[in-house]
C-alpha cells in the first residue's frame, strides 16, 4: 500500500469526569485501494480506514475508544487477580460478584 498526503490531527477523549486524553492521529491517502487510512500514534495497532477522510476520522475515534476499553478491562482484571491472590478472607461473612458496565467514551476532535 502506497500512501501519500500524510496529515496529523489531535483527537481528544473525554468522559463526565475531568480526565481528558489527547491522541495524535495520522491520516494517509491510499492511492492503491482508495480512501484514507488513520493511525493513532500513541496506541500501537490502533488503525482504521474510511472511504474519505471524514469517514476515516469517525472510524479511528471508535477504534481509539475500543482500544482504550480493552486496555482498561485488561488492567482491571490484572489488578483483581493480584488482589484476590493476596487477599485475606478471615472475617468475610458473604461474597458476591457485581457486574459494572463501563460508560461510553465521548470522542471529540480538538
Image (cartoon, rainbow, N blue to C red):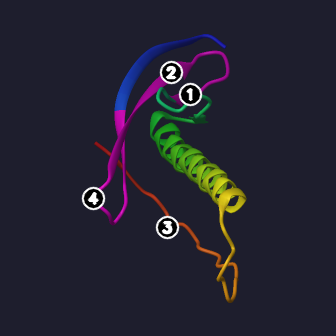
Mark 2 or 4: in front is 4
Q: CA distance from mark 1 to mark 3?
A: 27 Å
Asked if residue 66 lies left or right of residue 85, the reply is left
Quarter of the image where the C terminus is located: top left
Q: Which residue is mark 4?
A: 18
Is residue 96 shown above or below 64? below
Between discs 3 and 4, the one toward the N terminus: 4
Q: Which residues are magenta?
A: 10-39
Give the residue displayed 46% in from the left and 40% down from the top.
57
Q: Position of residue 10 (x, y in %)?
A: 34, 34
Between discs 1 and 3, the one toward the N terminus: 1
* Quarter holding residue 97: bottom right
Checking the image for residue 28, the label placed there is 2
Q: Which residue is mark 1?
A: 37
Question: Relative to the observer, which residue lies in front, 88 or 6?
Answer: 88
Give the residue displayed 52% in from the left and 40% down from the top.
60
Label 1 with label 3: CB-CB less than 8 Å: no
Q: Position of residue 11 (x, y in %)?
A: 37, 40
Asked if residue 108 lies left or right of residue 81, the reply is left
Label 2 with label 1: CB-CB less than 8 Å: yes
Q: CA distance from mark 2 to mark 4?
A: 32 Å
Give the residue displayed 47% in from the left and 30% down from the top.
42
Q: Position of residue 29 (x, y in %)?
A: 52, 21
Q: CA distance from mark 3 to mark 4?
A: 14 Å
Amino acid at each position: 500500500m502506497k500512501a501519500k498526503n500524510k496529515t496529523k490531527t489531535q483527537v481528544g477523549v473525554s468522559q463526565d469526569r475531568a480526565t481528558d486524553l489527547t491522541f495524535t492521529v495520522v491520516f494517509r491517502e491510499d492511492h492503491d485501494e482508495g480512501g484514507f487510512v488513520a493511525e493513532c500514534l500513541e496506541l500501537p495497532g490502533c488503525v482504521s480506514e474510511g472511504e474519505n477522510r471524514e469517514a476515516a476520522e469517525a472510524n479511528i475515534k471508535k477504534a481509539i475508544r475500543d482500544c482504550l476499553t480493552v486496555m482498561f478491562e485488561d488492567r482491571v482484571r490484572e489488578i483483581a487477580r493480584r488482589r484476590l491472590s493476596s487477599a485475606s478472607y478471615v472475617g468475610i461473612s458473604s461474597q458476591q460478584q457485581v457486574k459494572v458496565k463501563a460508560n461510553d467514551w465521548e470522542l471529540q476532535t480538538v
